[in-house]
Image (spheres, rainbow, N blue to C red):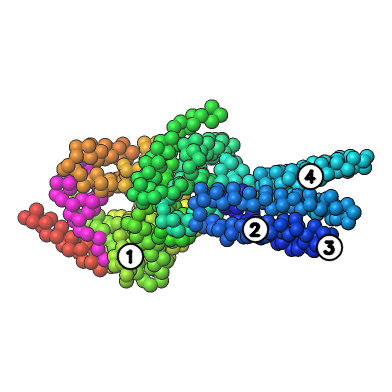
């Protein structure tokens, strides 16, 4: 049982026991006065009053929110002594009344002693250290009294009293075991035996109030195993469960008895420390503790002959004076843990104010993104794509978001949010429809392009209505010729999905004339096998390689390798992020087909792109005329 809840449970019985002692005690004073034994009874009652006052002071002293563990343990010891003494006083009054045979007070004494034993076995069943000694204190005098009668019926009553004593002990012990078992099941995780979420939250509430009162500090670790789902999916849940049990065992062995360890569910664990006097010591110790624990968790696991290697992402948060709610500290630790995952997993992040502000900013972005389309805040830009003769042959459609509070929000910030929340489906549909409208308008104006590239999200690509939506929009806005200009750009992350499903969707779209480009090639998951299997038409060299052409020989080698691979697979190549003549010449000399970047033009609004197209055509016409002259 939660120790503090257990103490609270017993504390309530102090007042009950005081009432059961003082009120019947008055009746005993009256009976004693009528039978000429008032003096010892009065002395007894004074003792009861004194012990009751002490018990009441113990009741008032109890404050689980402010008392530290040592203070609680001292209070508990005093509370045990109180119960021992108060029941011992009832045995004392039995001794006083039992000899009064002529006045028949002995019967009242016997009944009272039996009643006290039943009360003790009922009220104190939550603590074996209480009910066992108290039943000895109450029942032993009865057994001895019956034996001292000296008659056969006295021996029989002594045996019966002993049997009753045994029954009370047995019933109390069984009730105690059942109570402990129920509390254990309610507060522990059935798989690992660690505390569960319910206990953890309750303990956190108590700890927070305690450290705020004592002006001390503690810390919480939130641990999430990296890629644990892969183990369940590939080896089965039985192996996964054994891994969780081993993880729990390692955490327990490392933490010892100085921490409270819980399993929140799935592969998430929490550790709550003891209390520290200084914040700096708490912070330093928590980080060192987390680093060593992470190393312990990363040691190889041998489960059913499988050699497994796990890592974990750990969020650390201090518990101090800034809040009084458990959910606040848990949420912050959770934020730190997800930041560790975002930074590549297998790491530790300590929550701080900078992280809090960044999370708050992203939450506000997420909230405002829901209304971006409704408020007409989403706009499209068109980045010119040039051939090796610097002729404009196409464009890539890029999305921009201008919010009244944040101004222009970079796609690198809001696209990820849209992916996570599912807004990318609606946003992607809007981008596609607006792009098709633009292409239709340009075609009617006589703007002739060779390709028109649109970025696709992986989530959008696999949405159930994606194919139907594309077919409907192409039917509405495009001709047979303009359909063949469309190039859907997908990132390498699509490779980790179902390859057969990817190929099936691509082939259906290719049948209506749409081509595919592999965006950011060379930075992620692609392989020669995937290039051979997937029906793609184009590779885009990532800007991170292009920008370092003049700086790193390795990036030059990477680019020439990608361009060579494209030739092998008969794929067109596009280089993005071209910013100067040197980069352009290097890419052109190594066989790149299409170029885009600030060297030619920044992304343009629709009207600006139209003017750029006309200027480029006029410039090329002048250059051709000059060559002929």
- The x, y position of residue 343, in whole percent, is 36, 47
Residue on which the image places disc 4:
141
Residue pictured at 22% horizontal, 37% vertical: 554
Indicate yes or no whether the magenta region holds residue 602. Answer: yes
Indicate which disc, 4 or 2, sits on the residue closer to the N terminus.
Answer: 2
Q: Relative to the observer, which residue lies in front, 112 or 232?
A: 112
Q: Secondary structure at mark 1?
A: strand
**Residue range of the region highlighted in magenta in the rendering:** 576-605
On the picture, is 112 further left or further right than 190? Answer: right
On the picture, is 130 further left or further right than 434? Answer: right
Residue on which the image places disc 2:
50
Work out how far the residue at label 2 is from the one at label 1, CA to CA, in angstroms: 77 Å
Near mark 2 (Cα within 10 A), the count class, few <14, some 14-19 or many ≥20, is: few
Q: Which mark is residue 34?
A: 3
Between disc 2 and disc 1, the foreground one is 2
Q: Secondary structure at mark 3?
A: helix
Between disc 3 and disc 4, the foreground one is 3
The answer to the question of whether label 4 and label 1 lie on touching residues, with beta carbons closer than 8 A, is no
Q: Secondary structure at mark 2?
A: helix
Residue pictured at 86% horizontal, 40% vertical: 147
Residue on which the image places disc 1:
401
Instruction: Please say if 235 is above or below 424.
Output: above
Indicate which disc, 4 or 1, sits on the residue closer to the N terminus.
Answer: 4
Near mark 1 (Cα within 10 A), the count class, few <14, some 14-19 or many ≥20, is: many
Indicate which disc, 3 or 4, sits on the residue closer to the N terminus.
Answer: 3
């Amino acid at each position: 049982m939660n120790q503090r809840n257990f103490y609270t449970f017993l504390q309530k019985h102090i007042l009950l026991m005081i009432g059961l002692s003082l009120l019947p005690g008055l009746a005993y004073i009256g009976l004693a006065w009528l039978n000429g034994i008032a003096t010892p009874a009065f002395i007894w009652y004074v003792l009861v009053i004194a012990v009751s006052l002490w018990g009441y002071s113990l009741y008032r002293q109890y404050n689980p929110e402010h008392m530290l563990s040592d203070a609680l343990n001292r209070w508990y010891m005093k509370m045990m002594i109180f119960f021992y003494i108060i029941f011992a006083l009832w045995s004392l009054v039995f001794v006083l009344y039992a000899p009064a045979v002529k006045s028949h007070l002995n019967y009242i004494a016997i009944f009272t002693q039996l009643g006290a034993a039943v009360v003790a076995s009922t009220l104190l069943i939550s603590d074996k250290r209480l009910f066992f000694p108290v039943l000895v204190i109450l029942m032993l005098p009865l057994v001895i009294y019956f034996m001292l009668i000296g008659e056969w019926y006295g021996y029989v009553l002594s045996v019966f009293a002993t049997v009753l004593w045994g029954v009370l002990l047995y019933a109390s012990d069984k009730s105690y075991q059942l109570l402990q078992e129920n509390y254990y099941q309610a507060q522990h995780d059935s798989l690992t035996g660690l505390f569960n979420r319910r206990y953890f939250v309750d303990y956190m509430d108590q700890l927070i109030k305690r450290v705020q009162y004592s002006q001390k500090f503690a810390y919480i670790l939130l641990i999430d195993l990296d890629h644990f789902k892969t183990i369940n999916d590939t080896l089965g849940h039985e192996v996964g469960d054994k891994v969780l049990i081993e993880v729990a065992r390692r955490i327990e062995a490392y933490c010892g008895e100085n921490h409270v360890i819980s399993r929140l569910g799935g592969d998430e664990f929490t550790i709550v420390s003891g209390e520290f006097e200084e914040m700096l010591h708490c912070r330093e110790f928590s980080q060192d503790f987390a680093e060593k624990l992470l190393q312990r968790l990363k040691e190889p696991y041998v489960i059913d002959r499988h050699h497994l290697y796990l890592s974990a992402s750990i969020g650390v948060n201090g518990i101090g004076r800034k809040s009084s709610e458990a959910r606040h500290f848990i949420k912050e630790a959770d934020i730190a843990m997800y930041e560790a995952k975002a930074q590549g997993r297998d790491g530790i992040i300590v929550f701080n104010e900078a992280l809090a502000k960044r999370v708050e900013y992203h939450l506000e972005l997420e909230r405002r993104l829901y209304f971006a389309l409704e408020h007409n805040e989403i706009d499209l830009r068109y980045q010119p794509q040039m051939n090796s003769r610097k002729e404009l042959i196409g464009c890539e459609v890029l999305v921009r978001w201008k919010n009244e509070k944040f101004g222009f929000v970079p796609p690198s910030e809001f696209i990820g949010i849209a992916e996570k929340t599912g807004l990318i489906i609606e946003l992607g549909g809007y981008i596609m429809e607006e792009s098709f409208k633009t292409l239709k308008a340009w075609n009617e104006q006589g703007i002739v392009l060779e390709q028109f590239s649109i970025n696709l999200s992986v989530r959008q690509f696999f949405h159930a209505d994606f194919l139907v939506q594309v077919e409907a929009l192409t039917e509405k806005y495009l001709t047979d010729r303009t359909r063949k200009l469309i190039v859907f750009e997908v990132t390498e992350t699509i490779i980790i999905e179902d390859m057969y499903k990817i190929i099936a969707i691509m082939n259906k779209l290719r049948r209506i004339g749409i081509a595919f480009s592999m965006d950011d090639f060379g930075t992620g998951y692609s392989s020669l096998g995937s290039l051979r299997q997937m029906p793609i038409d184009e590779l885009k060299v990532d800007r991170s390689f292009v920008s370092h052409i003049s700086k790193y020989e390795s990036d030059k080698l990477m680019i020439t390798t990608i361009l060579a691979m494209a030739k092998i697979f008969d794929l067109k190549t596009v280089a993005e992020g071209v910013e100067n003549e040197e980069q352009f010449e290097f890419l052109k000399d190594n066989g790149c087909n299409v170029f885009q970047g600030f060297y030619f033009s920044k992304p343009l609004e629709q009207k600006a792109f139209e003017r750029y197209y006309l200027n480029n055509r006029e410039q090329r016409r002048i250059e051709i005329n000059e060559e002929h002259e």
